Amino acid sequence: MELDKITEKIIGCSYDVSNTLGSGFVEKVYENSLYHRISKESMEVVQQHQIKVIYDGILVGEFFADLLVEKLVLVELKAVRELEEIHMAQALNYLKASGLPVCLLMNFGRPKIEVRHLVPYDVWKNQARPQPQYIPPRSRKA
């Protein structure tokens, strides 16, 4: 399925969830509801998708994006009064670390859902993402 069609379907599902539930629930309620709604569209969706952060060839951290749809689109959900710069930074970091083409940042905390469509900066596309490499811990000497 084409990327634009996937994002269009996801956004449609999110409006359905928002119109049905309204605002006021915690983020996990919207995550579970959107997971269910996207699944009904026969799209592949994974909750709490692990994203590994690699530095200098080693795994230095990991995050969990709320949803990954069709192995192409990250979906990061919030249930806050207003999206702030920290939410954008988090979603952009997930996008950069994942190497995926798009992240939808959604806020269910307002009467009308907010959706931000984020794409990687061109410079990220040119950077090769090294694969994690296990390096055993150094033994401590007493």
Image (cartoon, rainbow, N blue to C red):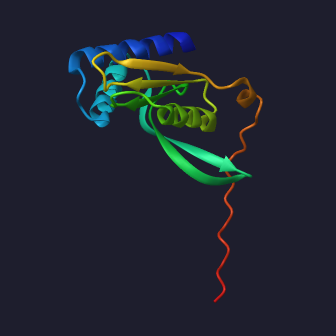
- Furthest-bottom residue in view? 142
Which quadrant of the view contains residue 123?
A: top right
Residue drawn where x is 31% and y is 26% of the image? 109
Residue drawn where x is 40% and y is 30% of the image? 77
Q: Is residue 91 left or right of residue 141?
A: left
Q: Is residue 59 left or right of residue 107?
A: right
Q: Is residue 89 left or right of residue 14?
A: right
What x and y, as percent, mark residue 21?
A: 22, 21
Which quadrant of the view contains residue 101?
A: top right
Is 81 in front, or is 2? 81
What x and y, as percent, mark residue 86?
A: 49, 36
Residue drawn where x is 54% and y is 48% of the image? 62
Which quadrant of the view contains residue 47?
A: top left
Q: Is residue 51 left or right of residue 121?
A: left
Image quarter in which the C terminus is found: bottom right
Residue drawn where x is 25% and y is 14% of the image? 19
What x and y, as percent, mark residue 112?
A: 31, 15
Is 1 in front, or is 104? 104
